């Protein structure tokens, strides 16, 4: 199964949504836009959705430089 994690970056927060390969949204949420929080989030999601033969693909809307903490994470 493939999962897609999309981020919309803003200065202080990221909106995010996880969909599966049939385009069904599994959940959406917001998180703070700092590298430490995002690193923990990505590790958690990778272990949950990117293991056991599954693939997790993350994409981000590049808005100025606000996507940089996510890329660094």
Image (spheres, rainbow, N blue to C red):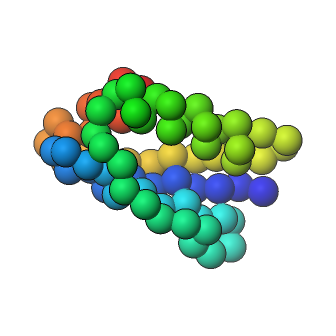
What residue is shown at x 53% (from left), y 36% (from top)?
Answer: 42
Seen in the image, is 36 located left or right of residue 50?
Answer: left
- Work out whether 50 lies above or below 21: above
**Is residue 55 at least partly visible in the picture?**
no
Seen in the image, is 72 located left or right of residue 22?
Answer: left
Q: Nearer the viewer, residue 24 or 15?
A: 15
Q: Quadrant of residue 64?
A: top left
Coordinates of residue 15 in the picture (x, y in percent): 34, 57
- Labels in figure, total: 0
Coordinates of residue 30 in the picture (x, y in percent): 37, 56
- Work out whether 53 lies above or below 8: above
Seen in the image, is 25 located left or right of residue 55?
Answer: left
Q: Quadrant of the N terminus?
A: bottom right
What residue is shown at x 50% (from left), y 31% (from top)?
Answer: 40
Coordinates of residue 6 in the picture (x, y in percent): 45, 55
What residue is shown at x 31% (from left), y 51% (from top)?
Answer: 14
- Work out whether 36 lies above or below 31: above
**Is residue 48 at least partly visible in the picture?**
yes
Q: Quadrant of the C terminus?
A: top left
What residue is shown at x 70% (from left), y 47% (from top)?
Answer: 49
Coordinates of residue 51 in the picture (x, y in percent): 78, 39
Q: Nearer the viewer, residue 63 or 37?
A: 37
- Which residue, as the protein is rendered here, is positioned at the far right? 52
């Amino acid at each position: 199964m493939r999962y897609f994690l999309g981020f919309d970056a803003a200065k202080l927060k990221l909106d995010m949504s996880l969909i599966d390969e049939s385009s069904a949204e599994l959940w959406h949420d917001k998180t703070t836009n700092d590298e430490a929080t995002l690193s923990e989030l990505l590790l958690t999601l990778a272990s949950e959705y990117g293991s056991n033969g599954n693939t997790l693909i993350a994409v981000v809307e590049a808005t100025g430089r606000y996507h940089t903490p996510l890329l660094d994470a």
